[in-house]
Amino acid sequence: MALVPTMGFFHEGHLSLMRVAGSKADRVVVSLFVNPAQFGPNEDLNHYPRNFEQDAKLAEDNGVSCLFCPDAKDIYPPRFQTWIRVEGLSQGLCGASRPEHFRGVATIVAKLLIIVQPDLAIFGQKDFQQLQVIRRMVRDLNIPVNIIAHPIVREPDGLAMSSRNTYLNAQERESALSLVQALRLAEKMVAHGSRSGPEVIQTVRKHIQSFGNTKIDYVFLCDPESLKPCREIVGETLLALAVWVGKTRLIDNTLLKQ
Ligand code: AMP
């Protein structure tokens, strides 16, 4: 049995994970839970987009056997006090501006794995740090599940699909393209022989800043396993971005290959 953990408001990225799950397992369970523990106090928990009827139909149409939608009060009952912290991997990148985020993610994913007991669980590479945090947690806690990574699913113009894209107005939607364009620029630089981390980062930052209404949270080059920063592009290097476009924080990444 396969598990696909989600926060709902399904797009083609989610549906693609569900279909891959169906190709690898006899039954697919999708969890739909907007997990309060992974939102910071000033984040968008209360505004996070929701559409249960549409999600239920899309899940059914994509071969899902069970949509698991627990209540927050059952997941975090009174006196709940047990948290999972994956220490090093949770600290940089998104962890720097979202200090409790990965504690919330690791705890909910551990709970879902214990409740559902799947043979495999599928996660998108769009949330690359999340994927590595979960892989580490599963190894460190000897959780008997196979974690499978799924490539980033994009809109035809390249924007990484995200439930949060729905927040963007027309002008912000244009500026949101700066992320994927900057990643493609970096890929080209590396293909043409550039190995300097600072040079690549500067080009990426400049490109994003040339669009209106963008504010960079981070542009980071690191080892894809340890997430430790790299100054040189050797072997496979992760280039990860988080950018505010208006009031919406978007993330994207690519693996640069020497
Ligand atoms: P979310 O509902 O945003 O928490 O996402 C649920 C799962 O879908 C996570 O494993 C995400 O990494 C994955 N996911 C979300 N967007 C995409 C995308 N554009 N491409 C691939 N996977 C995605």
Image (cartoon, helix red, strand yellow):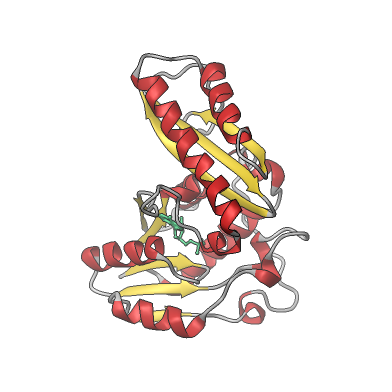
Q: Indicate the quadrant containing the N terminus: top left, top right, bottom left or bottom right.
A: bottom left
Residue at (59, 61) in percent of width and height: 107
Residue at (32, 77) in percent of width and height: 64
User: x, y percentage for residue 140?
Assistant: 49, 47
Residue 129 appears in the picture as rendered: no
User: x, y percentage for residue 235?
Assistant: 37, 22
Q: Residue furthest bottom?
A: 53
Eyeballing the image, is 39 above or below 149? below
Q: Indicate the quadrant containing the C terminus: top left, top right, bottom left or bottom right.
A: top left
In the image, ligand 1 is in what quadrant?
bottom left
Q: Residue 155 or 145: which is nearer the viewer? A: 155
Residue 185 appears in the picture as rendered: yes
User: x, y percentage for residue 13?
Assistant: 39, 60
Q: Residue 66 or 215: which is nearer the viewer? A: 215
User: x, y percentage for residue 228?
Assistant: 55, 29
Q: Residue 172 or 236: which is nearer the viewer? A: 172
Q: Residue furthest right?
A: 41
Eyeballing the image, is 166 above or below 193? below
Residue at (33, 67) in percent of width and height: 18
170 horizontally vs 16: left or right: right
